[in-house]
Image (cartoon, rainbow, N blue to C red):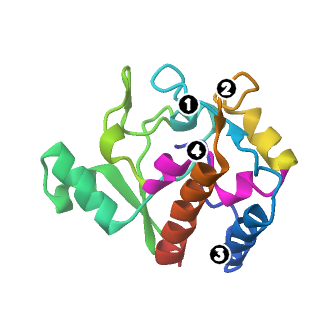
Amino acid sequence: MPGVLYAPGMDGDSTQRARTLLQQKREGAWYAGGLRFACRFPECCDCCSGKRGPGYVWVSRDEMATIAAHLGIGFDLFQAAYTRPVDSRFSLVEKPNEDCIFLGDGGCSIYAVRPAQCRTYPFWEENLRNRAAWRLEAAHCPGIHDNAEPVPADEVERRLGEDIAWRRRHEP
């Protein structure tokens, strides 16, 4: 999801903020009735393109190994060819136009094994802070619209929980 910064300015408080969001949901948070979202993959792919500028698609070593196996190549080759080090983490590289390296004419070439960041979008804690944050993301994501069927709150919470767990394990 180049162009969508996964962790802009994230600090050590991110896990606590995400926990607070889950607690608010359990207590009747603003999205308790679900959120209207329907990914328009493979037609859209805006979140994977460079339309929003450069960004990071964070990948863990386990995710790198899974993607490498999916591609039928070794871990070291995958890491060298498809990732870039950013401080103590790794991000997928981008094409010169800032699209994700795995975005092609038919959409994501690794969709079945895409990283957690991609699986959980747009249900990230920074997008679920409040209605205003969700509306701000909707301005960039055609999948967030009033005509979409609501994603049930328990599914929103499941994806948010996956995002929180990934960040807890992999953020520096």
- In the rendered structure, which amino acid carries the disc numbered 1? Cys
- In the rendered structure, which amino acid carries the disc numbered 2? Ala
Distance in Å between CA atoms under marks 3 and 4: 24 Å
Q: Which residue is mark 3?
A: 15
Count of number-bearing discs: 4
Residue 131 is left or right of residue 126, and the answer is right
How far across and down, in percent of the image, does residue 80 sit?
A: 26, 57
Magenta residue span: 116-130
Q: Are marks 3 and 1 in contact (CB under 8 Å)?
A: no
- Secondary structure beneath dot 3 equals helix
| Residue pictured at 45% horizontal, 24% vertical | 42
**Mark nearer the viewer, 3 or 4:** 3
| Residue pictured at 31% horizontal, 50% vertical | 82
- Secondary structure beneath dot 1 equals loop
Query: Which of the marked residues, 2 or 4, is nearer the chain's N terminus?
Result: 4
Distance in Å between CA atoms under marks 2 and 3: 29 Å
Q: Which residue is mark 4?
A: 54
- In the rendered structure, which amino acid carries the disc numbered 4? Pro
One can see residue 129 in this view: yes
Query: Which of the marked residues, 1 or 4, is nearer the chain's N terminus?
Result: 1
Q: Which residue is mark 1?
A: 39
- The outermost residue toward the right is 132
How far across and down, in percent of the image, does residue 90 sit?
A: 41, 63
Label of residue 148 in the image: 2
Q: Is residue 47 magenta?
A: no
